[in-house]
Amino acid sequence: MSVSLDWLLSLNGENVVSYVVIFDAGSTGSRARVYTLRSNASGGRLLVNEKAFSVEPGLSEFVSLPNESAEYLQPLLDRVKKCIPPKKWAETPIILRATAGLRLLPNETASAILESVAGVFNKSGFRLPVQGAVSILDGTDEGFFAWLSLQFLRGGSCLGKDLSTAPKTTSQAIFDLGGASFQLSNEGVHSLPSAYEGTQFFFAHSYLGLGLMTAMHSMLLRSSNLSAAESTRHLQSPCFPANTTVREFNAFFL
């Protein structure tokens, strides 16, 4: 795994209540989630509250003006700050993971956008817990976290539990359709040898360019007999009603 969760599991245990801020920068918009955690008697942490905020469009909209991404995210940061006591800001970790919208961009362009975002976070008063706290999430890791979310929602095995002792029923799979990519994650069903107890096997793959918006983009280009390199706002599709108007932004359509 290229994304470590150690920073989340090692929050300062002296505080009864702690917070974590996660920014999910997708291809069509950015979401900020504020998690409130409370220590329990065994030294673990329980999720007691979650708040979410969002803005549109996605960070990939700022290809030509990466510095403007800072101003774009500021309203989200302002709303996040209202959820956390100021005295807790310095100890509250904040991270941003961008997904397929930025994975589709050239490395230099994506890096310029992320650098601008990191500058805003550094001035926010929150703590950047690890190097690369503002970065692009690998497609396979995105699939893994989708699978992990499924375990949490179903009340099954999760971090800190011995997966080898969990009751084995049916294989669990999740299909995650985003704006610019599609993730498929499937839990392994084979019995584990005793030497590998505690290890969970799963398959995860990200299909870049097969998200809802990018697939629509490709469909419209194909039905209009155009290539991706051609620039036009006059696209045709037999799937749409007559005289349909489609608003284009960046590489996607709404």
Image: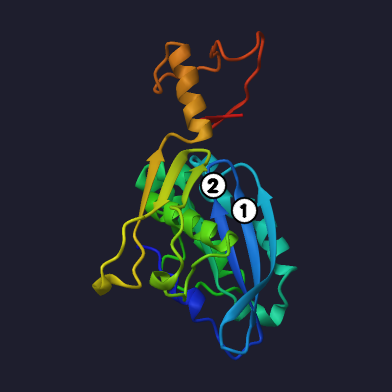
User: What's the CA distance linking mark 2 and mark 1?
Assistant: 8 Å
Left or right: 176 as drawn, with respect to 206: right
Q: Looking at the figure, which quarter contains the N terminus? A: bottom left
Q: Which colouring convention does the figure follow?
A: rainbow
Q: Position of residue 145 (x, y in %)?
A: 47, 58
Quadrant occupied by the C terminus? top right
Position of residue 220 relative to residue 96, above or below, is: above
- Of all residues shown, which one is farthest toward the right? 82
Which element is circle 2 on?
loop
Q: Residue 137 versus residue 45: which sits nearer the camera? A: 45
Residue 31 circle label: 1
What x and y, as percent, mark residue 36? 67, 73
| Image label count | 2
Q: Is residue 219 above or below residue 74?
A: above
Q: Nearer the viewer, residue 21 or 210?
A: 210
**For residue 121, which quarter of the picture?**
bottom right
At a point 55% along the width and 75% down the height, the residue shown is 127
Residue 57 is drawn in which quadrant? top right
Closer to the camera in the image, 146 or 25: 146
Residue under the point 47% across and 55% down:
147
The disc labelled 1 sits on which kind of residue?
A: Arg
Q: Which mark is residue 26?
A: 2
Instruction: Please tell me which of labels 2 and 1 falls first in the chain.
Output: 2
Residue 54: x and y, percent? 67, 51
Q: Is residue 246 above or below residue 87?
A: above
The residue lying toward the viewer, choosing from 18 and 196, is: 196
Q: Residue at x 64, y 68 (%)?
A: 35
Q: Are marks 2 and 1 in contact (CB under 8 Å)?
A: yes
Along the horizontal axis of the image, is 155 left or right of 199?
Answer: right
Q: Is 20 on the left-hand or right-hand side of 211?
A: right
Residue type at mark 2 is: Gly
